[in-house]
Amino acid sequence: MHAFDVLGDPVRRRILELLAEEEQTSGAIVAVIQREFGITQAAVSQHLRVLRDSGFATVRPEGTRRIYAVDPEPMVAIDRWLDRFRSFWEPKLDALATEVARGKKKRRAERKD
């Protein structure tokens, strides 16, 4: 499965967001995803399997629990792929940053007056 096929699903993106914050047990992931998306435990397990099989997540046993974590390597590959497109938005973001800095400078100058 292609990386963007994996990331195209909102449930899998949300699981990765949870894992980016910290490692999670499968039970904790299921609880959040069921609450937010209203899907079954079996459906969440399928999404976890896709993330594992595609390399986006790792799992390790800890007693009777399974602990999931993000594997950063696929994200690095996506970032490399996106590099060819950064030129479309980086100048605009740089210009925005310049305008924000000018606005802050202007507000500071107005407060001093």
Image (cartoon, helix red, strand yellow):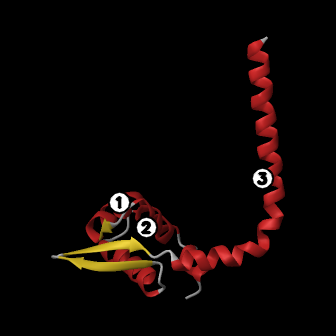
Q: Nearer the viewer, mark 3 or mark 2?
A: 3
Residue placed under numbered mark 2 in the picture: 15
On screen, residue 33 above or below 73: above
Q: Amino acid at mark 2?
A: Ile
Would you call the spot at circle 1 few (<14 residues within 10 Å), some (14-19), or many (20 or more)? some
The first of marks 3 and 2 along the sequence is 2
Q: Amino acid at mark 1?
A: Val
Q: Nearer the viewer, mark 2 or mark 1?
A: 2
Residue at left 38%, top 72%? 69
The first of marks 3 and 1 along the sequence is 1
Q: Nearer the viewer, mark 3 or mark 1?
A: 3
Specify the quadrant of the image occupied by residue 106: top right
Residue placed under numbered mark 1 in the picture: 32
Disc on res. 93:
3
Q: Secondary structure beneath disc 2?
A: helix
Q: Amino acid at mark 3?
A: Leu
Specify the quadrant of the image occupied by residue 111: top right
| Nearest the eye: 90 or 50 | 90
Q: Secondary structure beneath disc 1?
A: helix
Alpha carbons under labels 3 and 1: distance apart: 34 Å
The first of marks 2 and 1 along the sequence is 2
